């Protein structure tokens, strides 16, 4: 098994599975509003978007696959190993299982779609998101090691504007704000850029920048260089993207600085509160 604590893993599996089914119901509601509470019978909707599977069977399989995907995502919140080769191998195994579950749902719903289009629409975004989350966890582990060294008196005093503490997160910001949008834009459709024009600026960028800045602030306090780094990488993307696409990416700039700034301020507040509580306990 990937995890040592089986009881905790089981709890995460059940919680993730329930959330997965909730996402499945939400998807059905978005595809056909009113199917849950309206006059339309519960399973009388096309859950298999382009498949020859009967609707009732498709709905059952859809719920099952979403439960499995949610369960697999649930155990991803737990560490697979302490580090080293085992961590990498177990992470790759987990990525493979989640990819297989996702492709089972994709092939169920998009039977007649060409495979290259499905890879660009599903596998590419999923892979980038998985790498982003894995990199964020690695940065968090690195910061925790720094906190342990600080409590032991082994770490130096805070650097100017906390540039040294922010440095490990710069790689994450580069991946989130420059590499991911560039890859999505290159692989996206020229007429309707769903991945780089909708999914990324209104979902991946605000959530990724906010949560990463929140994690940094909770561990290191207010780090003003991180929001600036996110904005700088986004600005570089907006400039370079104009070389091969005529899409206005100016909306990304305020998102890239506002969300990490809010996340970092919130994290800094939590960090200050925790340190006050630790001093009171001492």
Image (cartoon, grey):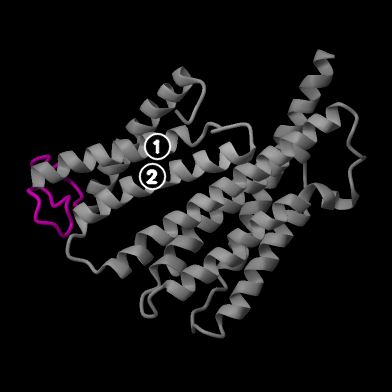
Classify residue 232 by image quadrant.
bottom right
Give the class, few, some or many, for how many residues have Cα within 10 Å of label 1's Cα (few <14, many ≥20): many
From the viewer's perspective, tell me whether residue 7 is left or right of residue 82.
left
Where is residue 172? Give x, y as percent.
65, 54
Few, some or many residues within 10 Å of mark 2 (<14, 14–19, 20+) = many
Indicate the quadrant where residue 255 lies: bottom right
Are the two marked residues, 1 and 2, in contact with CB atoms closer than 8 angstroms? yes
Q: In the image, what residue occupies the spot 67% across and 64% down?
A: 231
Q: Is residue 8 left or right of residue 280?
A: left
Residues rendered magenta in the picture: 32-54
Q: Which residue is mark 1?
A: 72
Q: Position of residue 276 (x, y in %)?
A: 80, 24
| Residue 186, above or below 78 | below
Looking at the image, which is closer to me, 105 or 23? 105
Residue receiving disc 2: 98
Q: Which residue sits at x=63%, y=68%?
A: 234
What is the quadrant of residue 265 in the picture? Answer: top right
**Residue, x 56% and y 79% (percent of image)?**
241
């Amino acid at each position: 098994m990937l995890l040592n604590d089986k009881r905790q893993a089981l709890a995460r599996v059940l919680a993730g599975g329930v959330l997965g089914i909730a996402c499945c119901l939400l998807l059905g509601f978005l595809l056909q509003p009113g199917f849950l509470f309206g006059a339309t019978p519960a399973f009388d909707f096309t859950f298999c978007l382009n498949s020859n599977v009967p609707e009732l069977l498709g709905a059952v399989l859809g719920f099952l696959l979403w439960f499995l995907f949610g369960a697999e995502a649930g155990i991803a919140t737990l560490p697979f190993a302490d580090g080293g080769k085992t961590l990498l191998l177990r992470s790759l195994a987990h990525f493979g299982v989640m990819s297989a579950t996702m492709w089972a749902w994709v092939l169920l719903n998009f039977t007649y779609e060409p495979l290259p289009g499905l890879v660009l629409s599903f596998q590419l975004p999923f892979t980038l998101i998985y790498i982003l989350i894995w990199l964020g966890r690695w940065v968090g582990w690195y910061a925790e090691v720094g906190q342990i060294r600080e409590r032991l008196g082994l770490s130096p005093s805070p650097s100017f504007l906390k540039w040294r503490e922010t440095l490990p997160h710069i790689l994450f910001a580069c991946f989130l704000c420059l590499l991911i949008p560039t890859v999505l834009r290159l692989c996206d459709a020229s007429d309707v850029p769903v991945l780089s024009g909708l999914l990324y600026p209104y979902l991946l960028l605000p959530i990724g920048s906010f949560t990463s800045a929140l994690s940094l602030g909770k561990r290191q306090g207010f780090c003003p260089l991180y929001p600036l780094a996110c904005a700088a990488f986004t600005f570089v993307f907006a400039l370079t993207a104009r070389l091969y696409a005529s899409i206005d990416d100016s909306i990304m700039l305020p998102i890239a600085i506002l969300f990490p700034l809010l996340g970092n301020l919130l994290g800094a507040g939590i960090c200050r509160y925790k340190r006050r509580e630790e001093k009171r306990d001492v």
